[in-house]
Amino acid sequence: KKKVPVVVVDEQELRSQVSEVVRQSVEETLNGLLDAEADALCQARRYERNAQRASTRAGHYERSLHTKAGIVQLQVPKLRHVPFETAIIERYRRRESSVEEALVEMYLAGVSVRRVEDITEALWGSRVSPSTISDLNQKIFERVEEWRNRPLEAKYPYVFVDGIWLKRSWGGEVQSVSVLVAIGVSTSGFREILGVAEGSREDTESWRQFLRYLRGRGLERIDLVVSDKSLGFLEALGEFYPNAKWQRCVVHFYRNVLHAVPRGKAKEVALMLKA
């Protein structure tokens, strides 16, 4: 005769109930710690009056905190006369910052938004919305634009420029895009990326806009420019930096020569060039 279990346990339901109990316990414990920290800063409990009291409560604000037990809601006290600083919030800020950096890194590495959502749910127990990812990307792009347009206050007598062709996904298709880059060597001998800008083509007008962008940010003088033998760049250079000397990039020169040499002779010609 088949045995029928007297008690049937829904394991999934049990796990969810236990998880909720743990989450609530963590939430209550953290809020209790926040209240205790506020009491210590005020040197008095809530509604307590004494001569040593340093401040009074001014309500609270809510903040979500991601924990291994799930998302808990913190009720962070507000104080009228002293700043409320807590290790719990500082830890949250560090965690929030690291999570944001990880999301940005994933996005810039080409991970799809849907896949980022799946990864965050697996790692942190909560699913990050597409709008959150979009907001983070907007934030990082603003920082990039601020860096791209920063004033160039130092002197850079030597500048290296080049155009780099990259692939970009746009409107459902992959396109090639030219990115113009300038690297300067300061009077103290250190290299620094001076500017990065998208150019439709490596033609005279693209280089003209790029050099105008550098000059407008404070790069008033260049003693020596190193680049490949781009006629478009050389035409634009004389317009914005007429006194700058120009030197052909040795690496580009090697490539140009070796491109015209039979493959079997490339190693021999390379040795001759270096000599």
Image (cartoon, helix red, strand yellow):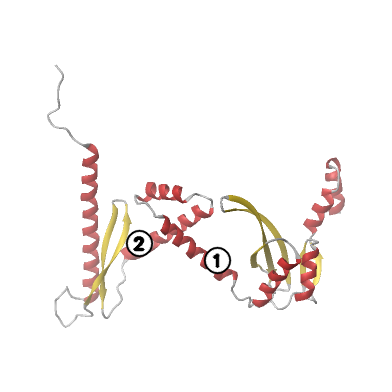
The nearer-to-camera label among 2 and 1 is: 1
Residue at image mark 1: 144
Labelled disc at residue 66: none
Give the residue displayed 50% in from the left and 54% down from the top.
107
- The kind of secondary structure element at disc 2 is helix
- Identify the image quadrant of the N terminus: top left
Residue at image mark 2: 92
- Identify the image quadrant of the C terminus: bottom right
Give the residue displayed 81% in from the left and 66% down from the top.
247
> How many marks on residues?
2
Q: Position of residue 188 (x, y in %)?
A: 68, 73
Q: CA distance from mark 2 to mark 1?
A: 25 Å
Q: Position of residue 36 (x, y in %)?
A: 21, 67
The kind of residue tagged 2 is Tyr
Q: Is residue 183 above or below residue 256?
A: below
Res. 251 image quadrant: bottom right
